[in-house]
Image: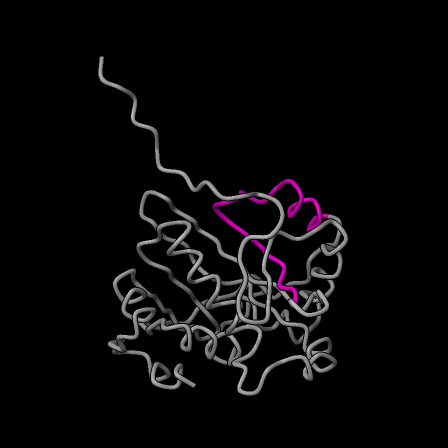
Amino acid sequence: MLPVTQPPTWRIPLRGPLFEGHCVRVGWPEPDEIDSLTALRNRPQVCAKFLDPRPLDPQRNREWIDHGMRRPYEALLAIRLKRGGALVGAIGWSRGDPSEGSFELGRVMIDADVLRRQRRNFPPGYAGVATDAGTALRDFGFRALGLTVMRSVFIDDNRLSRRALLLGGARIVGGSRMQRADGSEVAVTRLELRREEWEGLVEGRKTFPGNPYWRQADG
């Protein structure tokens, strides 16, 4: 009788911290952070940047984060500053597929009000919290999860996500128009970063056609 082949899985902690960047630490949300993240997501200027712009119900979102999220194949992670520990936003992924070695990076939101109060704590030339957290998540994905490809989709006028993803080495692979859950239509851009491209990036080889930002990533 042939042995049963087990499908690939991602073996990472499902609670607590996961990784860190230059100025941020990123991990699963603590219970006392969930309502703050929901309130941030429900701000009109934040909702507008999501493919589903409808406000979230706080209780249902708490239950989803606590029990409904398919960890580790989807994630909503809290971004905290190393200095002082302030909660400044979130980042995560969806459509995690260990068989293909892929996920879709997204769920990025930054609390601009908190950042304005914390700017003195950042070093000169700091690329920003979204770029810092996004680059750290990129490296975690390829190193800890063994990704083959990381994908992302963002609304064209979401300059924060665009800058963070392009500075992280992703390249534009296409665009289209999508109808959102509230019936509105938006233009979106699709990006991806493959393992061999990531390896070239971390080794200092800059060979990323389709990414107009890659030279700026040197600072």
Vertical side of 62 occupied by 170: above or below: below
User: Image check: 186 left or right of 208?
Assistant: right
Residue at the far top in the pictured view: 1
| Colour scheme employed for the rendering of this structure | one colour
Vertical side of 74 occupied by 88: above or below: below
x and y, in percent, of residue 16 in the image: 62, 48
x and y, in percent, of residue 115 in the image: 68, 78
User: Image check: 92 left or right of 120?
Assistant: left
Q: Is residue 62 magenta?
A: yes
x and y, in percent, of residue 176 in the image: 37, 71
x and y, in percent, of residue 113 in the image: 73, 78
Q: Quadrant of residue 56?
A: bottom right
For the C terminus, the quadrant is bottom left
Count of picture labels: 0
The residue located at (46%, 68%) in the rendering is 135
In depth, the one of 25 and 165 nearer the eye is 25
**Bounds of the magenta span?**
60-81
In depth, the one of 81 and 93 nearer the eye is 81
Q: Is residue 71 magenta?
A: yes
The residue located at (37%, 60%) in the rendering is 150
User: Image check: 44 left or right of 91?
Assistant: right
For the N terminus, the quadrant is top left
Q: Quadrant of residue 205?
A: bottom left
Vertical side of 17 occupied by 194: above or below: below
The residue located at (61%, 42%) in the rendering is 68
